[in-house]
Image (tube, rainbow, N blue to C red):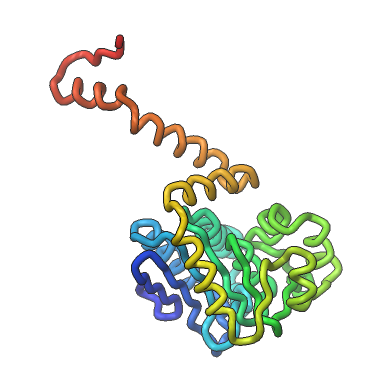
Amino acid sequence: MSDPRIELRIEGHLARLTLRRPEKLNAIDEDMVDALLRACRTIERSDARVAILSGEGGTFCAGGDIEAWSSLDADTFSRRWLRDGHGAFDALARLTVPLIAVLNGHALGGGLELAACADLRIAEAHVKIGQPEAGLGIIPGWSGTQRASRRFGTQLVRRMALFGEVYSADEAIALGLVDQVVPTGEGGAAAQAAAARVLKRSPRATELTKMLINAAEHEESERVVEALAGAVAAASEDLTEGLAAHRQKRPARFDR
């Protein structure tokens, strides 16, 4: 990893992805967006079968760095900041391995959008969750209306994004924003336990099941359909015959 503020450690079948900018409440700037995308590619090419996402310094993520994006002109903001951020967050949400988010601090704005990428959200008891963007004159730009609506429900997103409601951890679990609430400081251990449960299950079945769930959410329907169809084709005798015919410079015989 070229950006020290995004730390990726792969320990056997477990990937640990940590935001390391505690002095800025782990707010994300353009270089960190690029590093997140690279980290996802590294995870996909590794032996990892589950990933844990957390923030350093008793906080999760304050979202997009206001100083970074507020200095951009409107064209650059839409073409680079929003587009590249979407690319990184989409890559997180579409990891082929389950992603566990440890909300060890507030998840507001882009922090909630980051948490929404996870398959499981574990919140420590002190956290607050919400979407304050409209108070700054901006929208929830990294799929804070789209993916968040698919995963949390449109009415809940309305309450946060339009009416500025902010929820405690206990309120968040009752509303379905998070999956588990643990005492402050115990999020990492809870995530480790959840990861251990994943590692006891079939890696291939887990990967396929996640892909199907994502397709059901319209997260990546096109890629899922093509990936599954491609896997069937790759395992077929037709491919074996087609490649053999190509190498032997003869017509393929599919007439069995």
Seen from the viewer's position, the closer of residues 44 and 137 is: 44
Q: In the displayed structure, would residue 103 be above or below residue 157?
A: below
Taking 199 as reference, is 128 left or right? right
Quadrant into which the C terminus falls: top left
Residue drawn 35% across and 74% down? 2
**Residue that lies at the very extreme toward the right in this rendered image:** 163
The answer to whether one can see residue 71 in this image is: no
Quadrant into which the N terminus falls: bottom left
Q: In the displayed structure, would residue 238 be above or below residue 98?
A: above
Q: Residue 153's x, y, as percent? A: 77, 55
**Occupied quadrant, residue 141:** bottom right
Seen from the viewer's position, the closer of residues 197 and 213 is: 197
Residue drawn 62% across and 74% down? 63
**Residue that lies at the very extreme toward the left in this rendered image:** 248
The answer to whether one can see residue 114 in this image is: yes
Q: Count numbered badges in the picture.
A: 0
Q: Residue 215's x, y, as percent? A: 59, 43
Taking 47 as reference, is 103 left or right? right
**Occupied quadrant, residue 244:** top left
**Residue that lies at the very extreme toward the top in this rendered image:** 255
Residue drawn 51% across and 41% down? 224
Taking 5 as reference, is 10 left or right? left
Seen from the viewer's position, the closer of residues 212 and 24 is: 212
Q: Residue 7's x, y, as percent? A: 42, 76
Q: In the displayed structure, would residue 57 be above or below residue 94?
A: below
